[in-house]
Image (cartoon, helix red, strand yellow):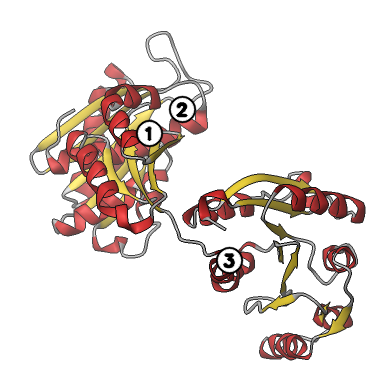
Amino acid sequence: MQLKFMKAGIISIGDELLIGQTVNTNTAWLGQELGKFGISVFKSTTIRDVKEDILQTVDAYLNETDFIIVTGGLGPTNDDITKETLTEYFGTSLVLNQQVLDRVTDFFQKRGKEMLDSNIQQAMLPKDALILDNNHGTASGMWFEKNGKVLVSLPGVPYEMEALIQEEVLPRIKATFGVRGNYYQTLMLQGIGESFLAEKIEDWEKRIYRDGLHLAYLPSTGLIKLRLTSEKGTKEAGLVNTYFDELRNGFPQYAYGMNEETIFEAVGELLKSKNATLGTVESCTGGGIASSFIAKSGSSAFFQGGLITYSNVLKNKLAHVSISTLEKYGAVSEEVAKEMAIGGKEVLSADYVIAVTGIAGPEGGSEEKPVGTVWIAIATPDGVFAEHFLFGEHRGRNIEKTELYAANFLRKKILEIED
C-alpha cells in the first residue's frame, strides 16, 4: 500500500472526554505523528464507554479506513470495557498472558504497591491479537488485523499512548504498509496576521505549489506556523529548507525560528550567544513574560529576575517610576513604560529589560485608552525604545499577545532589525 493513499481513523473512548472533564489531547498528537509518516487521518470520533457504540463505530471505521487507532477504555475498573468488546468483535477469546502478568507484577513490586485482582485481570488478553508491551503502565496495547485492515487499541493515558505509538506501533506500521515518511518543516512567525502574510508571499506560494510541495497555515494567538511538506521524503529536504530560508531572509522581523520553537526559547538562545542578561518589569502580564523565559532549562544563564509592578505604588517603589510621570501621563503610557524599563535595568543589573504596561480588560478602558492598549518598552545598552499596540477586547488574548510581542520586540532590537 502506498503511503499517500493510506487513510487512518482515530476513535477516542471515554465519557470524561465527552463531558469536557478531560481534554482530548491524544487526537491532536496522533494527527501530528501520523502526518510525519504521510498517513492521512480521515476522521476521528469520540464515543462513550458503551459496548454498542464501540461495536458500531469500529465496524464503520473498518469499512472506511485502512488503519484505526482506538484510545481509552483499557483500565482495571469495571467501566473499562474496550478490551472485552474488541475481543468479541474480532471473534477471539481472552487468555492469561503470562509475560504480561509478570510485567504487571514487577510494575507493582517496584513501586511497593499491592496488586489487586483487577490488576491481574489486565493480563487477560485476546488470544489472536498481537500484544504490545506497555513499559510505562499496566494496560497493554493490542494489534488486531481483519481483511487487510489494522486496528490498534491503546491506553488513553497520554504518555503511555505516545510511548506505545513511537516504540511499537509506528515501526510495525512501517513494516506492514511499507510506509515512507513525509518530510516537513515548520517556520515560526510572530507579529503578522495570516491574511497579511498570505498577500506578501503570494508569488512564493505559487512557486512551491509548482514544485509539488504542500503548504499549511497554522495560526494561533499572536503567531503563525507555516508548514511545508514533501511527499517524497527527505530527498526534497533541501528544496523545503531553501524555500524557508528565502522567507527567513525576506521577513526577519517576523520569522524567528523553526519547528515549534517558542519565541522565548529563540530569544533566550540569542541572549546566551551574546553573553547578555535579561530582566522584566511587568504590569498587565503579571509575571507571564518572566515565566515564559524561565520555562526551559538553562534560562539562569541569561535571566536575572523580574519585577511585578501591577500597582502604581510598586511601579514607583520597585521600578523607580516617578510619581509625577504617573500622574501626568497615566500608568499606561510611553513615558511610564520607558521609566519602568530604565528603573528595572538599574535594579536588576541586566543588559536588556522588557517593561510592559497596558489595559488587558474587560474593564478599565476609556475613549483615549481603550481596552487592549499596551505599551512595551525595551531598555538596551544603547538606549530605551517603546512601541504602542492596540490588541483587542479579550483579556486572555491581550495578555498572551503582549508577552509574544514583547519577546519579538526584544529580538529585533538585539539583532538590529527594523520593521
**Mark 3 burial class by Cα count in 10 Å: few <14, some 14-19, many 20+:** some
Residue at horizontal 91 percent and vertical 56 percent from the top: 51
370 sits to left or right of 130: left
User: What numbered label is drawn on residue 173?
Assistant: 3
Q: Nearer the viewer, residue 351 or 93?
A: 93
Residue at horizontal 16 percent and vertical 55 percent from the top: 276
User: What numbered label is drawn on residue 360?
Assistant: 2
Residue at horizontal 13 percent and vertical 56 percent from the top: 274
- From mark 2 to mark 1, how far is it between C-alphas? 9 Å
Rendered location of residue 234, percent (x, y): 34, 58
Q: Amino acid at mark 1?
A: Thr
- Quarter of the image for residue 76 reads bottom right
Q: Earlier in the sequence, mark 1 or mark 3?
A: 3
Rendered location of residue 374, percent (x, y): 35, 25
Q: Amino acid at mark 2?
A: Ala
**Mark 1 burial class by Cα count in 10 Å: few <14, some 14-19, many 20+:** many
What element does badge 3 sit on?
helix
- From mark 2 to mark 3, how far is it between C-alphas? 49 Å
**Mark 2 burial class by Cα count in 10 Å: few <14, some 14-19, many 20+:** many
Rendered location of residue 56, percent (x, y): 86, 49
Q: Is residue 138 above or below residue 181?
A: below
Asked if the residues shown at circle 2 and circle 1 are in contact, with their CB atoms under 8 angstroms apart, the answer is yes
Q: Is residue 55 above or below residue 214?
A: below
Residue at horizontal 51 percent and vertical 62 percent from the top: 179
Q: Please name which of the two marks, 2 or 3, marks the residue nearer to the observer.
A: 3
What element does badge 2 sit on?
loop
